[in-house]
Image (cartoon, rainbow, N blue to C red):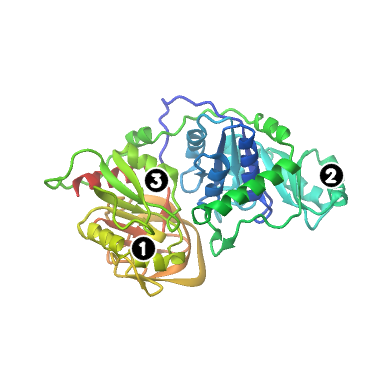
Amino acid sequence: MRASVPSSARASAAPPRLVVAAPSSGSGKTTVATGLMAALAARGLAVSPHKVGPDYIDPGYHSLATGRVGRNLDAYLCGPDLIGPLFLHGARGCDIAVVEGVMGLYDGAAGQEELASTAQVAKLLRAPVVLVVDASSQSRSVAALVHGFVTWDPEVRIGGVILNKVASDRHEALLRDALESSGVPVLGVVRRAPRVGTPSRHLGLVPVAERRDSAVEAVAAMAAQVAAGCDLEALVALAHRAGDLSCAEWDAATALVSSPPPPLPLPAPRAGLPEGPAVVAVAGGAAFSFSYAEHAELLAAAGAEVVVFDPLRDEKLPEGTRGVVVGGGFPEMYATELSANEPLRKAVAELALSGAPVAAECAGLLYLCRELDGLPLCGVLDATARMTERLTLGYRDAVAVSDSVLARAGTRMRGHEFHRTVVEPGAGDAPAWGVRTPEPRVEGFVRRGVHASYLHTHWAAEPGVARRFVERCRTS
Protein backbone atom coordinates (compact mmCIF):
# COMPACT_ATOMS: atom_id res chain seq x y z
CA MET A 1 0.00 0.00 0.00
CA ARG A 2 1.23 3.47 -0.79
CA ALA A 3 0.24 6.51 1.24
CA SER A 4 -0.99 9.48 -0.74
CA VAL A 5 -1.94 13.07 -0.13
CA PRO A 6 -5.71 13.74 -0.28
CA SER A 7 -6.67 15.39 -3.55
CA SER A 8 -8.47 18.12 -1.66
CA ALA A 9 -5.24 19.34 -0.05
CA ARG A 10 -3.82 22.56 -1.37
CA ALA A 11 -0.58 22.70 -3.30
CA SER A 12 2.30 24.40 -1.48
CA ALA A 13 4.80 26.85 -2.90
CA ALA A 14 8.06 25.10 -3.74
CA PRO A 15 11.38 26.84 -3.08
CA PRO A 16 14.15 27.18 -5.68
CA ARG A 17 16.06 23.88 -5.79
CA LEU A 18 18.99 22.00 -7.27
CA VAL A 19 19.86 18.33 -7.52
CA VAL A 20 23.57 17.55 -7.18
CA ALA A 21 24.35 14.37 -9.12
CA ALA A 22 27.35 12.57 -10.60
CA PRO A 23 28.16 9.99 -13.28
CA SER A 24 29.11 7.48 -10.57
CA SER A 25 29.75 7.02 -6.89
CA GLY A 26 33.05 8.45 -5.71
CA SER A 27 32.90 11.50 -7.95
CA GLY A 28 32.64 13.92 -5.03
CA LYS A 29 28.95 14.75 -4.93
CA THR A 30 28.74 14.47 -1.12
CA THR A 31 31.58 16.96 -0.72
CA VAL A 32 30.08 19.34 -3.28
CA ALA A 33 26.48 19.02 -2.07
CA THR A 34 27.36 19.42 1.62
CA GLY A 35 29.79 22.23 0.87
CA LEU A 36 27.20 24.01 -1.26
CA MET A 37 24.60 23.72 1.50
CA ALA A 38 27.02 25.17 4.04
CA ALA A 39 28.27 27.93 1.72
CA LEU A 40 24.71 29.06 0.95
CA ALA A 41 23.77 28.93 4.64
CA ALA A 42 26.81 31.07 5.44
CA ARG A 43 25.37 33.69 3.09
CA GLY A 44 22.25 33.89 5.21
CA LEU A 45 19.98 31.61 3.17
CA ALA A 46 17.67 29.10 4.85
CA VAL A 47 18.77 25.92 3.08
CA SER A 48 16.65 22.76 3.00
CA PRO A 49 18.86 19.62 2.79
CA HIS A 50 17.73 16.40 1.12
CA LYS A 51 19.28 13.08 0.11
CA VAL A 52 18.05 10.70 -2.60
CA GLY A 53 17.80 7.10 -1.44
CA PRO A 54 17.91 5.31 1.92
CA ASP A 55 21.24 6.74 3.15
CA TYR A 56 21.19 7.79 6.82
CA ILE A 57 24.74 9.11 7.13
CA ASP A 58 24.95 11.92 4.56
CA PRO A 59 21.86 13.67 5.99
CA GLY A 60 23.73 14.04 9.28
CA TYR A 61 26.41 16.09 7.52
CA HIS A 62 23.68 18.01 5.70
CA SER A 63 22.14 18.91 9.05
CA LEU A 64 25.45 20.28 10.27
CA ALA A 65 25.78 22.32 7.09
CA THR A 66 22.33 23.89 7.27
CA GLY A 67 21.07 23.71 10.83
CA ARG A 68 17.98 21.84 9.60
CA VAL A 69 16.97 18.18 9.65
CA GLY A 70 18.38 16.27 6.69
CA ARG A 71 15.61 14.35 4.96
CA ASN A 72 15.54 11.43 2.53
CA LEU A 73 13.65 11.21 -0.74
CA ASP A 74 13.31 7.54 -1.68
CA ALA A 75 10.94 6.67 -4.51
CA TYR A 76 11.33 2.94 -3.84
CA LEU A 77 10.53 2.96 -0.14
CA CYS A 78 7.83 5.64 -0.30
CA GLY A 79 6.64 5.52 -3.89
CA PRO A 80 7.06 8.25 -6.52
CA ASP A 81 3.83 9.99 -5.50
CA LEU A 82 5.26 10.94 -2.10
CA ILE A 83 8.52 12.49 -3.35
CA GLY A 84 7.05 15.94 -4.02
CA PRO A 85 4.93 16.06 -0.84
CA LEU A 86 7.81 14.93 1.39
CA PHE A 87 10.12 17.43 -0.27
CA LEU A 88 7.69 20.28 0.35
CA HIS A 89 7.28 19.20 3.96
CA GLY A 90 11.01 19.32 4.58
CA ALA A 91 11.54 22.53 2.61
CA ARG A 92 8.78 24.55 4.26
CA GLY A 93 9.95 28.10 5.00
CA CYS A 94 13.30 27.73 3.22
CA ASP A 95 14.91 30.02 0.66
CA ILE A 96 16.50 27.25 -1.37
CA ALA A 97 16.81 23.46 -1.36
CA VAL A 98 19.79 21.29 -2.28
CA VAL A 99 19.19 17.61 -3.02
CA GLU A 100 22.18 15.25 -3.04
CA GLY A 101 21.79 12.34 -5.42
CA VAL A 102 22.67 8.69 -4.96
CA MET A 103 25.17 6.59 -6.95
CA GLY A 104 25.28 7.59 -10.62
CA LEU A 105 22.62 9.92 -11.98
CA TYR A 106 20.67 7.17 -13.77
CA ASP A 107 21.31 4.35 -11.27
CA GLY A 108 18.31 3.16 -9.26
CA ALA A 109 16.74 0.03 -7.86
CA ALA A 110 18.26 -3.00 -9.60
CA GLY A 111 16.13 -4.21 -12.48
CA GLN A 112 13.52 -1.47 -11.94
CA GLU A 113 14.60 0.92 -14.73
CA GLU A 114 14.68 4.49 -13.36
CA LEU A 115 12.87 3.75 -10.09
CA ALA A 116 14.59 5.40 -7.10
CA SER A 117 17.30 6.97 -9.25
CA THR A 118 18.49 10.53 -8.87
CA ALA A 119 17.19 11.19 -12.38
CA GLN A 120 13.67 10.09 -11.41
CA VAL A 121 13.66 12.27 -8.29
CA ALA A 122 14.95 15.26 -10.27
CA LYS A 123 12.09 14.84 -12.73
CA LEU A 124 9.51 14.45 -9.97
CA LEU A 125 10.82 17.65 -8.35
CA ARG A 126 11.12 19.44 -11.71
CA ALA A 127 14.58 20.44 -10.54
CA PRO A 128 17.68 21.26 -12.60
CA VAL A 129 20.66 18.96 -12.12
CA VAL A 130 24.26 19.97 -11.46
CA LEU A 131 26.59 17.19 -12.58
CA VAL A 132 29.74 16.71 -10.49
CA VAL A 133 32.41 15.15 -12.70
CA ASP A 134 35.64 13.60 -11.44
CA ALA A 135 38.02 15.06 -14.00
CA SER A 136 41.21 13.70 -12.45
CA SER A 137 42.07 11.31 -15.29
CA GLN A 138 40.65 13.02 -18.37
CA SER A 139 40.68 16.16 -20.44
CA ARG A 140 38.81 16.27 -23.78
CA SER A 141 36.89 13.09 -22.96
CA VAL A 142 34.95 15.04 -20.34
CA ALA A 143 32.87 16.57 -23.16
CA ALA A 144 31.82 13.14 -24.45
CA LEU A 145 30.90 12.03 -20.95
CA VAL A 146 28.79 15.13 -20.26
CA HIS A 147 27.18 14.92 -23.70
CA GLY A 148 26.11 11.37 -23.00
CA PHE A 149 24.52 12.24 -19.67
CA VAL A 150 22.76 15.29 -21.10
CA THR A 151 21.23 13.41 -24.04
CA TRP A 152 20.40 10.09 -22.35
CA ASP A 153 17.07 11.34 -20.97
CA PRO A 154 15.84 14.67 -22.39
CA GLU A 155 13.45 15.05 -19.44
CA VAL A 156 16.41 15.40 -17.08
CA ARG A 157 17.61 19.00 -17.21
CA ILE A 158 21.35 19.15 -16.59
CA GLY A 159 21.91 22.84 -16.00
CA GLY A 160 25.63 22.86 -15.38
CA VAL A 161 28.78 20.98 -14.48
CA ILE A 162 31.13 21.20 -11.52
CA LEU A 163 34.55 19.80 -12.34
CA ASN A 164 36.12 18.02 -9.36
CA LYS A 165 39.70 16.97 -8.64
CA VAL A 166 41.19 19.33 -11.23
CA ALA A 167 44.99 19.21 -11.10
CA SER A 168 46.18 22.63 -12.37
CA ASP A 169 45.38 25.77 -14.33
CA ARG A 170 46.44 23.96 -17.50
CA HIS A 171 44.16 21.02 -16.74
CA GLU A 172 41.26 23.38 -16.07
CA ALA A 173 41.82 25.19 -19.37
CA LEU A 174 41.75 21.89 -21.29
CA LEU A 175 38.51 20.84 -19.60
CA ARG A 176 36.79 24.18 -20.17
CA ASP A 177 37.87 24.22 -23.80
CA ALA A 178 36.45 20.72 -24.34
CA LEU A 179 33.13 21.62 -22.73
CA GLU A 180 32.73 24.96 -24.53
CA SER A 181 30.85 23.42 -27.45
CA SER A 182 28.63 21.20 -25.28
CA GLY A 183 26.28 23.99 -24.30
CA VAL A 184 26.56 22.98 -20.65
CA PRO A 185 28.10 25.74 -18.50
CA VAL A 186 30.89 25.05 -16.05
CA LEU A 187 29.55 26.29 -12.72
CA GLY A 188 32.54 25.38 -10.64
CA VAL A 189 36.02 23.93 -10.54
CA VAL A 190 37.22 22.19 -7.37
CA ARG A 191 40.94 21.55 -7.28
CA ARG A 192 42.53 18.27 -6.36
CA ALA A 193 43.27 18.40 -2.65
CA PRO A 194 43.80 16.08 0.29
CA ARG A 195 40.56 14.36 1.22
CA VAL A 196 38.43 16.46 3.53
CA GLY A 197 38.39 14.87 6.99
CA THR A 198 35.41 12.56 6.55
CA PRO A 199 36.67 9.10 7.57
CA SER A 200 34.94 5.99 6.30
CA ARG A 201 34.50 2.43 7.49
CA HIS A 202 32.56 -0.69 6.53
CA LEU A 203 29.21 1.02 5.81
CA GLY A 204 30.38 4.40 4.50
CA LEU A 205 31.22 7.67 6.23
CA VAL A 206 31.49 7.72 10.01
CA PRO A 207 28.23 9.31 11.24
CA VAL A 208 28.21 12.85 12.61
CA ALA A 209 26.93 11.63 15.99
CA GLU A 210 30.23 9.81 16.53
CA ARG A 211 32.58 12.68 15.66
CA ARG A 212 30.67 15.92 16.00
CA ASP A 213 33.60 18.31 16.56
CA SER A 214 35.70 16.95 13.70
CA ALA A 215 32.59 16.71 11.52
CA VAL A 216 31.96 20.42 12.03
CA GLU A 217 35.51 21.10 10.84
CA ALA A 218 35.02 18.81 7.83
CA VAL A 219 31.82 20.58 6.79
CA ALA A 220 33.55 23.95 7.12
CA ALA A 221 36.34 22.69 4.85
CA MET A 222 33.80 21.50 2.27
CA ALA A 223 32.11 24.90 2.36
CA ALA A 224 35.43 26.64 1.81
CA GLN A 225 36.24 24.42 -1.19
CA VAL A 226 32.88 25.08 -2.83
CA ALA A 227 32.84 28.81 -2.08
CA ALA A 228 36.33 29.21 -3.53
CA GLY A 229 35.76 27.16 -6.67
CA CYS A 230 32.09 27.51 -7.58
CA ASP A 231 29.93 30.32 -8.90
CA LEU A 232 27.37 30.52 -6.11
CA GLU A 233 25.37 33.25 -7.84
CA ALA A 234 25.02 31.13 -10.98
CA LEU A 235 24.01 28.09 -8.92
CA VAL A 236 21.33 30.07 -7.09
CA ALA A 237 20.08 31.47 -10.41
CA LEU A 238 19.85 27.93 -11.78
CA ALA A 239 17.88 26.82 -8.72
CA HIS A 240 15.35 29.58 -9.44
CA ARG A 241 14.66 27.96 -12.82
CA ALA A 242 13.08 24.90 -11.20
CA GLY A 243 9.52 24.21 -12.31
CA ASP A 244 6.37 24.59 -10.23
CA LEU A 245 5.07 21.65 -8.19
CA SER A 246 1.34 20.98 -8.12
CA CYS A 247 1.34 18.48 -5.25
CA ALA A 248 0.40 19.16 -1.64
CA GLU A 249 2.81 19.22 1.26
CA TRP A 250 2.99 16.02 3.31
CA ASP A 251 1.65 16.32 6.82
CA ALA A 252 1.88 13.60 9.47
CA ALA A 253 -1.56 14.21 10.97
CA THR A 254 -3.23 14.27 7.55
CA ALA A 255 -1.39 11.11 6.55
CA LEU A 256 -2.69 9.31 9.64
CA VAL A 257 -6.27 10.38 8.96
CA SER A 258 -6.09 9.15 5.37
CA SER A 259 -4.51 5.80 6.25
CA PRO A 260 -6.64 2.76 7.11
CA PRO A 261 -7.43 2.24 10.81
CA PRO A 262 -5.62 -0.51 12.75
CA PRO A 263 -7.17 -3.68 11.30
CA LEU A 264 -7.01 -5.84 14.44
CA PRO A 265 -9.02 -5.28 17.63
CA LEU A 266 -6.77 -3.83 20.30
CA PRO A 267 -6.69 -5.28 23.82
CA ALA A 268 -8.53 -3.36 26.51
CA PRO A 269 -6.24 -1.02 28.43
CA ARG A 270 -4.73 -2.46 31.60
CA ALA A 271 -6.01 -1.00 34.83
CA GLY A 272 -3.86 1.69 36.37
CA LEU A 273 -2.29 2.96 33.17
CA PRO A 274 -1.46 6.67 33.38
CA GLU A 275 -3.57 9.14 31.44
CA GLY A 276 -2.19 11.44 28.77
CA PRO A 277 0.13 10.77 25.82
CA ALA A 278 1.97 7.46 25.80
CA VAL A 279 5.71 7.97 26.15
CA VAL A 280 7.61 6.34 23.28
CA ALA A 281 11.34 6.13 23.95
CA VAL A 282 13.41 6.38 20.76
CA ALA A 283 17.05 5.25 20.90
CA GLY A 284 19.61 7.82 19.77
CA GLY A 285 23.22 8.78 20.38
CA ALA A 286 26.32 7.55 18.64
CA ALA A 287 25.31 3.88 18.46
CA PHE A 288 21.79 4.44 17.09
CA SER A 289 21.90 7.48 14.82
CA PHE A 290 19.94 6.10 11.85
CA SER A 291 16.34 7.25 11.64
CA TYR A 292 13.94 9.02 9.33
CA ALA A 293 12.59 12.26 10.79
CA GLU A 294 9.07 11.39 9.63
CA HIS A 295 8.93 8.42 12.04
CA ALA A 296 9.05 10.62 15.14
CA GLU A 297 6.63 13.06 13.50
CA LEU A 298 4.13 10.27 12.82
CA LEU A 299 4.45 8.92 16.36
CA ALA A 300 3.79 12.39 17.76
CA ALA A 301 0.85 12.94 15.40
CA ALA A 302 -0.58 9.60 16.58
CA GLY A 303 -0.58 10.91 20.13
CA ALA A 304 2.76 9.80 21.55
CA GLU A 305 5.22 11.83 23.55
CA VAL A 306 8.51 11.03 21.82
CA VAL A 307 11.54 11.06 24.13
CA VAL A 308 15.07 10.27 22.91
CA PHE A 309 17.39 8.19 25.09
CA ASP A 310 21.02 7.15 24.61
CA PRO A 311 21.75 3.45 25.29
CA LEU A 312 25.43 4.31 25.72
CA ARG A 313 24.83 6.72 28.60
CA ASP A 314 21.35 6.43 30.08
CA GLU A 315 20.94 3.75 32.72
CA LYS A 316 17.15 3.77 32.64
CA LEU A 317 14.40 4.37 30.14
CA PRO A 318 12.62 7.74 30.15
CA GLU A 319 10.04 8.14 32.89
CA GLY A 320 6.71 6.61 31.94
CA THR A 321 8.00 4.72 28.87
CA ARG A 322 5.25 2.63 27.29
CA GLY A 323 7.02 1.66 24.08
CA VAL A 324 10.53 1.64 22.62
CA VAL A 325 11.83 2.22 19.09
CA VAL A 326 15.43 1.23 18.38
CA GLY A 327 16.50 2.09 14.85
CA GLY A 328 19.70 1.64 12.90
CA GLY A 329 23.29 2.54 13.63
CA PHE A 330 26.58 0.94 14.58
CA PRO A 331 26.13 -1.09 17.77
CA GLU A 332 29.00 -3.31 16.63
CA MET A 333 31.35 -0.34 17.16
CA TYR A 334 30.05 0.16 20.70
CA ALA A 335 29.29 -3.39 21.77
CA THR A 336 31.56 -3.15 24.82
CA GLU A 337 29.90 0.05 26.09
CA LEU A 338 26.38 -1.18 25.31
CA SER A 339 27.07 -4.44 27.11
CA ALA A 340 28.53 -2.60 30.10
CA ASN A 341 25.30 -0.62 30.55
CA GLU A 342 23.62 -3.49 32.35
CA PRO A 343 20.90 -1.42 34.07
CA LEU A 344 19.50 -0.21 30.75
CA ARG A 345 19.76 -3.65 29.16
CA LYS A 346 17.68 -5.06 32.00
CA ALA A 347 15.16 -2.22 31.74
CA VAL A 348 14.64 -2.88 28.03
CA ALA A 349 14.31 -6.62 28.63
CA GLU A 350 11.78 -6.10 31.44
CA LEU A 351 9.70 -3.75 29.31
CA ALA A 352 9.68 -6.24 26.41
CA LEU A 353 8.80 -9.10 28.79
CA SER A 354 5.79 -7.10 30.01
CA GLY A 355 4.34 -7.13 26.50
CA ALA A 356 4.94 -3.45 25.81
CA PRO A 357 5.61 -2.64 22.13
CA VAL A 358 9.23 -2.63 21.00
CA ALA A 359 10.14 -1.93 17.36
CA ALA A 360 13.71 -2.66 16.35
CA GLU A 361 15.41 -2.27 12.95
CA CYS A 362 18.84 -3.60 12.01
CA ALA A 363 21.05 -2.19 14.79
CA GLY A 364 18.04 -2.42 17.08
CA LEU A 365 17.70 -6.10 16.17
CA LEU A 366 21.30 -6.69 17.24
CA TYR A 367 20.73 -4.81 20.52
CA LEU A 368 17.83 -7.09 21.43
CA CYS A 369 19.85 -10.26 20.81
CA ARG A 370 21.33 -12.39 23.56
CA GLU A 371 24.84 -11.33 22.56
CA LEU A 372 26.87 -9.51 19.90
CA ASP A 373 30.35 -10.84 19.14
CA GLY A 374 30.27 -12.70 22.46
CA LEU A 375 29.26 -9.69 24.55
CA PRO A 376 25.93 -9.90 26.40
CA LEU A 377 23.19 -7.53 25.30
CA CYS A 378 19.46 -7.28 26.11
CA GLY A 379 18.55 -10.95 25.68
CA VAL A 380 15.05 -10.15 24.50
CA LEU A 381 15.57 -12.48 21.54
CA ASP A 382 17.00 -15.98 21.77
CA ALA A 383 19.53 -15.22 19.06
CA THR A 384 23.16 -14.22 18.71
CA ALA A 385 24.74 -11.65 16.40
CA ARG A 386 28.23 -11.34 14.98
CA MET A 387 30.20 -9.27 12.51
CA THR A 388 31.06 -10.80 9.11
CA GLU A 389 33.05 -9.80 6.03
CA ARG A 390 29.98 -10.07 3.80
CA LEU A 391 27.99 -6.95 2.96
CA THR A 392 24.23 -7.42 2.71
CA LEU A 393 22.81 -4.51 0.73
CA GLY A 394 19.74 -3.76 -1.32
CA TYR A 395 16.07 -2.91 -1.58
CA ARG A 396 13.59 -5.54 -0.50
CA ASP A 397 9.93 -6.27 -1.26
CA ALA A 398 8.39 -7.66 1.91
CA VAL A 399 5.13 -8.88 3.38
CA ALA A 400 4.34 -9.13 7.09
CA VAL A 401 4.23 -12.82 8.03
CA SER A 402 2.92 -12.44 11.59
CA ASP A 403 0.49 -10.05 13.25
CA SER A 404 2.55 -7.58 15.26
CA VAL A 405 2.56 -4.18 16.94
CA LEU A 406 3.52 -2.67 13.56
CA ALA A 407 1.44 -4.47 10.98
CA ARG A 408 -1.14 -7.15 10.36
CA ALA A 409 -0.03 -10.32 8.58
CA GLY A 410 -0.30 -9.75 4.84
CA THR A 411 0.65 -6.07 4.96
CA ARG A 412 3.05 -5.31 2.11
CA MET A 413 5.91 -2.88 2.56
CA ARG A 414 9.18 -2.08 0.92
CA GLY A 415 12.43 -1.93 2.82
CA HIS A 416 16.20 -1.73 2.61
CA GLU A 417 18.98 -3.84 4.10
CA PHE A 418 22.50 -2.56 4.77
CA HIS A 419 24.73 -4.45 7.21
CA ARG A 420 27.82 -6.59 7.71
CA THR A 421 26.42 -8.67 10.53
CA VAL A 422 24.49 -11.91 10.79
CA VAL A 423 21.91 -12.99 13.36
CA GLU A 424 21.52 -16.69 14.16
CA PRO A 425 18.84 -17.88 13.81
CA GLY A 426 17.72 -15.40 11.18
CA ALA A 427 14.04 -15.73 12.06
CA GLY A 428 11.94 -16.72 15.04
CA ASP A 429 8.98 -19.08 15.29
CA ALA A 430 6.87 -16.09 14.26
CA PRO A 431 8.94 -14.27 11.61
CA ALA A 432 8.54 -10.56 11.00
CA TRP A 433 8.75 -10.48 7.21
CA GLY A 434 8.66 -12.65 4.16
CA VAL A 435 11.16 -11.13 1.76
CA ARG A 436 10.84 -11.72 -2.00
CA THR A 437 14.15 -10.19 -3.10
CA PRO A 438 16.83 -11.18 -3.90
CA GLU A 439 15.45 -14.64 -3.05
CA PRO A 440 12.37 -15.74 -1.09
CA ARG A 441 12.99 -16.13 2.65
CA VAL A 442 11.59 -15.21 6.04
CA GLU A 443 13.45 -13.05 8.52
CA GLY A 444 13.07 -11.24 11.81
CA PHE A 445 11.17 -11.88 15.02
CA VAL A 446 7.69 -11.19 16.39
CA ARG A 447 7.33 -12.09 20.07
CA ARG A 448 4.80 -10.59 22.47
CA GLY A 449 5.04 -6.86 21.69
CA VAL A 450 8.43 -7.10 19.96
CA HIS A 451 8.94 -6.60 16.24
CA ALA A 452 12.62 -6.96 15.32
CA SER A 453 14.09 -7.19 11.84
CA TYR A 454 17.02 -6.22 9.64
CA LEU A 455 14.63 -4.39 7.33
CA HIS A 456 14.66 -0.58 7.35
CA THR A 457 11.24 0.75 6.35
CA HIS A 458 9.89 4.27 5.82
CA TRP A 459 6.69 4.76 7.79
CA ALA A 460 5.50 7.62 5.59
CA ALA A 461 4.66 4.92 3.04
CA GLU A 462 2.40 3.18 5.57
CA PRO A 463 1.40 5.68 8.29
CA GLY A 464 -0.87 3.12 9.93
CA VAL A 465 2.30 1.50 11.31
CA ALA A 466 2.86 4.45 13.64
CA ARG A 467 -0.77 4.65 14.69
CA ARG A 468 -0.94 0.93 15.40
CA PHE A 469 2.25 1.14 17.51
CA VAL A 470 0.98 4.08 19.58
CA GLU A 471 -2.45 2.47 20.11
CA ARG A 472 -0.68 -0.61 21.44
CA CYS A 473 1.38 1.62 23.75
CA ARG A 474 -1.84 3.01 25.21
CA THR A 475 -3.16 -0.45 26.11
CA SER A 476 0.00 -2.26 27.27
Task: Name the residue that disc number 2 marks.
Answer: 176
Q: Which residue occupies the foreground of this view, 154 or 337?
A: 337
How far is the residue under mark 3 from the one under mark 1? 21 Å
How far is the residue under mark 2 from the one under mark 1? 52 Å
Q: Earlier in the sequence, mark 2 or mark 1?
A: 2
Q: Position of residue 95 (x, y in %)?
A: 58, 30
| Amino acid on which disc 1 is placed | Tyr
Q: Position of residue 44 (x, y in %)?
A: 61, 31
Q: Are marks 3 and 2 in contact (CB under 8 Å)?
A: no
Q: Secondary structure at mark 1?
A: helix
Task: Name the residue that disc number 1 marks.
Answer: 367
Q: Secondary structure at mark 2?
A: helix
CA neighbours of label 1 inside 10 A, class few (<14), some (14 to 19), many (20+): many
| Amino acid on which disc 3 is placed | Trp
CA neighbours of label 2 inside 10 A, class few (<14), some (14 to 19), many (20+): some
Task: Name the residue that disc number 3 marks.
Answer: 459
Q: Say whether residue 80 is left or right of residue 232.
A: left
Q: Position of residue 381 (x, y in %)?
A: 29, 66
